[in-house]
Image (tube, rainbow, N blue to C red):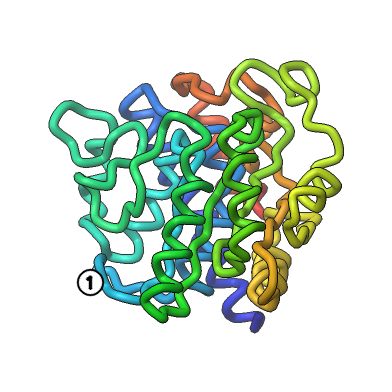
Amino acid sequence: MTSEKRRQLEEMCLQFRNELMDILHDIQTGHPGGSLSCTEILTTLYFDLMRHDPKRPEMEGRDRVILSKGHAAPMLYLNLAEAGYFPKEDLKTLRQVGSHLQGHPCRHKTPGVELSTGPLGLGLGAGVGMALGERLKGSDAYIYVLLGDGEINEGAVWEAAMAGAKYKTCRCIAILDHNGVQLDGTNDEIMPLGDLAAKWTAFGWNVITCADGHDVEQVESALFQAKGETERPSVVICETVKGKGISFMEGKSIWHGKAIGDAEYRQAKAELEGGKSHG
């Protein structure tokens, strides 16, 4: 990654964090914590790695992102709007009646959304299926499935993992936003996940660890490693912080879906203007 590309992506991530605070404060609903933890992952995908065309959302052979942790929809929408899939003005309608920007992504309403998600555990199985479909068509497209910590408590994720290993869907790359926190508490409090690298390895996946999922260069490097694996599906475990960039949100389960008050909004904006959002 060039220094110019790194600077561009970091500036974009800071912009998205600011816009996220504006939007969620205005509408008094939404999911800030998990959106902030996957900012660099989504931004690196859409503005550095992926083959896609906002003017042709259904383009054959496109790379795809499945936001399996669907509650992080606000950050997905920010990326899609910035890329040009729909007007940025639409972001103000998030979670409002009649808006195409639902609280969780809807494939039938929003350009650029590849799978309707919300009920956790659906994305990886769909991603494996999409990868098999692209293989049948002779396509070299990649399917990126972004998973959350709480989500991998779901048995359907591990059924999909077995299928991916069996069918060697190396172009289906799972990315775990490993922030250590889920809806009601930490992973260890709710359902301990154990040794995740060993677990995915046992299921037949190539495991890559990204030590700082808020460093765009490290995220890019890990994903390039995953793309270099041609025999097994890969999972990139990105170590992240829930609520990254906002001190009072970081690592706090309460900010999974809490509305942002006026005083909290002012503090968040002050911290972001001070450039504290970079990893």
Q: Nearer the viewer, residue 74 or 112?
A: 112
Q: Residues within 10 Å of mark 1 (few under 14, many from 20)?
A: few
x, y percent for residue 160: 57, 46
Q: Position of residue 179 (x, y in %)?
A: 70, 38
Q: Is residue 129 left or right of residue 165?
A: left
Q: Position of residue 51 (x, y in %)?
A: 42, 76
Instruction: Write the residue at 42% across / 49% down.
Output: 76
The quadrant where residue 193 appears: top right
- Residue 62 falls in which quadrant of the image? bottom left
Residue 279 visible, this orientation: no
The quadrant of the rendering that contains the C terminus is bottom right
Residue sitting at x 42%, y 60%:
130
What residue does disc 1 label?
Answer: 56
- At label 1, the amino acid type is Arg
Front in this rendered view, residue 179 or 20:
179
Residue 55, compared with residue 11, is above or below; it is below
* Vertical position of residue 148 compared to residue 10: above or below: above
